[in-house]
């Protein structure tokens, strides 16, 4: 009789995948002196030629086995008996499940606080919420819809990565914060109103997550984005940078803001199309009334009302601008409708705080993805950062989805990957690494799941599309911000009139 013969007589309710793994792992454990004392091995039932029940194993051995089973099997195991139920809820088991989930993702993902602050129940909830979001994304009907009434004029909504915190930029220059995990979704004032806000300004905001901090922390810039209606400089038009830190834990957690710096940067008859924040650098894409664009890159800590420490990049005049993204290695990506261009950020110099004079010749380009035939119509959705590269998620022609990977090393060449296509044209609101959300024919909302990745030029991959009932989410006009998506938990947020709608597409498994 072998050591594992007795495991064939285990409870019949156990998943077959668990039994196969248990047999293999059990042999390993029996042959490792540091796992099981000899005295315990000699006392076990198979020495007396009796049959061994799986639940007769010591709890620490069961925990070691359960650490490596599929998460869905883990939920089934706890229905077998009290001992397996207890072991399946231990911290060691769910720490392993948490780490396994992170390892599966190509993009950076983490809890909002150090893992040792989480109880086993909190880790279980964190993992199951995201596992469910991945599984349920392609199901047609949403799981839950909620709404927030806003008694304010709101221009911009931003979800902090992780999907829990929603930031709303108001017309008075203040920023509200909503905890979307709070059943009541109460708001708190994260940053106060401007001292003298101007009603003609539209305020926007951008965040820069501090990846080096194990607890959620980020810088946020609050800025006016539209100067077209201004005939002269006005108050309330400063670029203001805040540091936002997570305080507390669990249901008592909240975000706290600390003022860092502010400086005026008003430029008349312009629109700020995009702002990117990374460390001490702030880049903004400016579009003028003469249909020209330029990119200002500030050292925001050293810029004041009298002096701007900056450098200016001038794209080609024929390019229709879309967005800018600051990259590691003092690089910057500029996305226009028909190409993506990477520039080096030159040494900054102190300059007068006035609009630059646009030269005849454009700035020197380090690398460009250019479509000379005019087939591409690029739209930049988001960027994800890892230790080696930044990945830009792009769409073109309403059907194609691309990932452009730009290495941190400036000497390495960016790599374009065709991620897939849809069978019909969609207006994509937001596209992530694995999930996308958009609209078809201005009437049907769609979710798109992306499970495959193909090199450009190979056989195209059809993406999985499911439809969402129209419900409260309606076609977006130019007066409302587009819907936003938290890819972590499949949460969609959109604003219509005086309401913000939150659509959760995950369901909580029975624990």
Image (tube, rainbow, N blue to C red):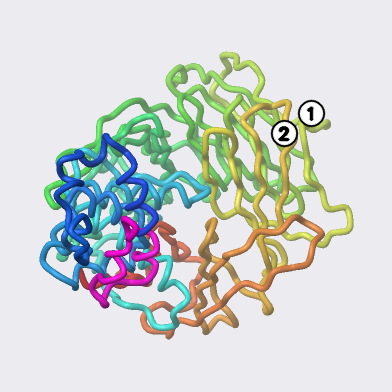
> Is disc 1 placed on a helix, strand or loop?
loop
Marking on residue 314:
2
Marking on residue 364:
1
Relative image position of residue 369 (x, y in whole percent): 78, 45
- In the image, residue 97 sits, relative to residue 210, either above or below, namely below
Choose between 136 and 239: the one closer to the eye: 136
On the question of residue 121 being in view, the answer is no
> Is disc 2 placed on a helix, strand or loop?
loop
On the question of residue 233 being in view, the answer is yes
Q: Which residues are magenta?
A: 1-22
Q: Is residue 161 left or right of residue 88?
A: right
Residue at 46% x, 44% y: name it.
108
Relative image position of residue 169 (x, y in whole percent): 34, 51
Choose between 128 and 418: the one closer to the eye: 128
Q: Is residue 44 left or right of residue 297?
A: left
Marking on residue 171:
none
Q: Gap between marks 1 and 2, in whole Å?
A: 9 Å
Q: Residues within 10 Å of mark 2 (few under 14, many from 20)?
A: many
Relative image position of residue 317 (x, y in whole percent): 78, 43
Q: How many numbered dots are placed on residues in this image? A: 2
Q: Residues within 10 Å of mark 1 (few under 14, many from 20)?
A: few
Relative image position of residue 186 (x, y in whole percent): 16, 59
Residue at 37% x, 71% y: name it.
16
Residue at 82% x, 32% y: name it.
360
Q: Is residue 351 left or right of residue 343?
A: left
């Amino acid at each position: 009789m072998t050591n594992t013969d007795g495991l064939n007589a285990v409870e019949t309710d156990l998943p077959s995948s668990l039994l196969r793994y248990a047999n293999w792992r059990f042999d390993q454990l029996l042959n490792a002196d540091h796992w099981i004392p000899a005295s315990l091995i000699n006392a076990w039932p198979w020495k007396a030629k009796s049959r061994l029940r799986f639940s007769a194993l010591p709890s620490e051995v069961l925990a070691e086995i359960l650490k490596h089973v599929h998460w869905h099997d883990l939920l089934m195991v706890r229905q077998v008996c009290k001992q397996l139920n207890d072991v399946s809820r231990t911290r060691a088991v769910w720490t392993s499940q948490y780490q396994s989930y992170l390892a599966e993702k190509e993009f950076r993902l983490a809890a909002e606080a150090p893992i040792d602050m989480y109880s086993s129940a909190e880790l279980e909830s964190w993992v199951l919420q995201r596992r469910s979001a991945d599984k349920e994304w392609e199901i047609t009907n949403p799981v839950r819809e909620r709404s927030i009434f806003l008694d304010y004029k709101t221009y911009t909504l931003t979800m902090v990565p992780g999907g829990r915190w929603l930031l709303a930029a108001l017309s008075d220059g203040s920023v509200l914060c909503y905890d979307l995990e709070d059943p009541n979704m109460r708001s708190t004032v994260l940053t106060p109103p401007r001292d003298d806000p101007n009603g003609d300004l539209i305020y926007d905001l951008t965040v820069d997550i501090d990846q080096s901090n194990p607890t959620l922390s980020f810088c946020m810039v609050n800025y006016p984005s539209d100067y077209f209606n201004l005939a002269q400089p006005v108050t309330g038009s400063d670029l203001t940078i805040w540091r936002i830190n997570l305080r507390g834990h669990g249901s008592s957690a909240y975000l706290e803001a600390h003022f860092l710096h502010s400086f005026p940067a008003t430029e008349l008859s312009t629109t700020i199309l995009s702002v990117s924040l990374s460390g001490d650098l702030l880049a903004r894409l400016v579009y003028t009334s003469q249909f020209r664009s330029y990119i200002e890159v500030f050292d925001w800590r050293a810029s004041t009302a009298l002096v701007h420490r900056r450098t200016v990049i001038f794209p080609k005049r024929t390019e229709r601008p879309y967005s800018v993204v600051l990259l590691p290695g003092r690089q910057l990506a500029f996305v226009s409708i028909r190409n993506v261009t990477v520039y080096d950020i030159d040494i900054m110099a102190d300059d007068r705080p006035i609009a630059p004079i646009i030269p005849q010749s454009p700035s020197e380009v380090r690398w460009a993805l250019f479509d000379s035939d005019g087939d591409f119509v690029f739209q930049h959705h988001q960027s994800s950062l890892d230790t080696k590269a930044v990945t830009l998620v792009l769409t073109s022609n309403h059907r194609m989805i691309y990932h452009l990977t730009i290495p941190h090393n400036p000497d390495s060449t960016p790599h374009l990957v065709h991620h897939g296509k849809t069978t019909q044209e969609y207006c994509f609101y937001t596209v992530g690494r694995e999930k996308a959300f958009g609209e078809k024919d201005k009437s049907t909302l769609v979710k798109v799941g992306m499970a495959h990745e193909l090199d450009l030029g190979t056989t195209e991959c059809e993406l999985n599309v499911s439809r969402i009932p129209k419900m409260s989410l309606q076609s977006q006009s130019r007066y409302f911000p587009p819907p936003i998506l938290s890819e972590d938990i499949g949460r969609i947020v959109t604003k219509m009139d005086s309401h913000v709608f939150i659509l959760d597409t995950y369901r909580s498994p029975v624990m």
